[in-house]
Amino acid sequence: MLRLQRALPERYTSASPQQLAAWIAAAKERLGSALLVLGHHYQRDEVMRWADARGDSFALSRLAAEHHEARYIVFCGVHFMAESADVLTGPDQQVILPDLNAGCSMADMADLDGVEEAWEVLADTTDIERVIPVTYVNSSAALKAFVGRHGGAVCTSSNGRAVLSWALLPDADGRRRADKVLFFPDQHLGRNTGYQLGWTEADMRVWDPRRDAGGLDERDVKEATLLLWKGHCSVHQRFRPEHVAAFRAEHPDGLVVVHPECAHDTVEVADQVGSTESIIKAVAAAPAGSVIAVGTEIHLVQRLDAETPDKTVVSLDPLVCPCSTMYRIDAAHLAWAVEGLVDGEVRNRISVDEETAGWARLALQRMLDIT
Ligand code: 13P
Ligand code: SF4
């Protein structure tokens, strides 16, 4: 999705790192508790050093909602995270994304038109009342609202299992809420969670939004329990079983921890799989002297290595590839955003309309009730 970030004034593009740091520090000092800077784990260090809180996408949105005194929330992360923060915060809080081009290529792989079209096709093929839509938190507010409207829930990389169990497994009275889940936008998180819950390949079909009827025939739809949207994260999809094999050959006692956005064949050969928060916990729990290969975004991997001097933390893929959209947020954009606030100008506000926000909030609330 194209979002237009205007070019920064020369004051910021030609400033030295020291100047930018001094301007950010001064703006933070002036704004005090009215400003809350949030930093996602994948942010670069020059940005992360200014974060009042670090965390995964959902933890940061919740934190924003708890800080009522913060009139301005500068979200150093990507677009869908800033939207979630806006959905969860009060009307007198404003959320700012320092660079509008910081999107998430995976979130952009499913849009409202495509999902509505899929829903219509499914309604012609199967009893739509028995289908629940589930969206990964990496999705637009419009899709979260779609899910809210159709009785579904959001999930994160740490609670996908609980949400799919809620949708598909029998409750205490032996009743199942639905027979099928349409899961978007990340096929890998859906597939990995499905396998964890005991489903097999035969229970899953990939819905390809670029093909007619998702590329599926009536029988596919009828047989599938999990309809997995054909989306992926280009950063996590790079981690392959060959990387695990190469690491194990060099470090037979090493530990391999990967994010569930990695493909299933990689997850299968890893020692542990989990969200960014669980990866951090896995590194903390490993004994001193451990060598740990991590399959996630490089900035988190490097930070874990620097902050855990008694362990060695390396990227599972030696030819690392950062998340290019997370990387768009730099000290210059942060300085531009916070200096704007000092001057009374809110730059790059991310605002979700009330109708969409209401339904999206419902889908997020269902997730919280489930987990
Ligand atoms: P978290 O939800 O763990 O923050 O991950 C977000 C993300 O973009 C992973 O690629
Ligand atoms: Fe999106 Fe992947 Fe970047 Fe996460 S790492 S923000 S899923 S593109």
Image (cartoon, grey):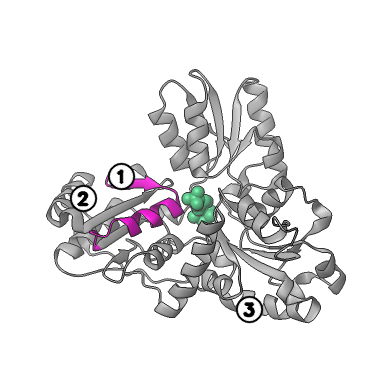
Quadrant of res 355: bottom left
Q: What is the residue that sits farthest to the front in this orientation? A: 173
Towards the viewer: 145 or 235: 145
Q: What is the residue that sits farthest to the top in this orientation? A: 289
* First in residue order: circle 1 vs circle 2: 2
User: What is the C-alpha distance between the residues marked 1 and 2?
Assistant: 10 Å
Mark 1 and ligand 2: say if the CB distance to the nearest ligand atom is below 8 Å. no
Q: Secondary structure at mark 1?
A: helix
Quadrant of res 153: bottom right
Q: Are marks 1 and 2 in contact (CB under 8 Å)?
A: yes
Q: Of the residues shown, which amino acid type is indicated by label 1?
A: Glu
Camera-near label (3 vs 2) is: 3
Q: Secondary structure at mark 3?
A: helix
Q: Of the residues shown, which amino acid type is indicated by label 3?
A: Glu
Q: Residues within 10 Å of mark 3 (few under 14, many from 20)?
A: few
Q: Which residues are magenta?
A: 47-71
Res 84 seen here = yes
Instruction: Point out residue 233 in the picture as x, y percentages from the top left corner.
Output: 58, 54
Instruction: Point out residue 222 in the picture as x, y percentages from the top left corner.
Output: 83, 69
* First in residue order: circle 3 vs circle 1: 1
Q: Going by the image, does 6 lie left or right of 10?
A: right
Q: Which mark is residue 20?
A: 2
Q: Secondary structure at mark 2?
A: helix
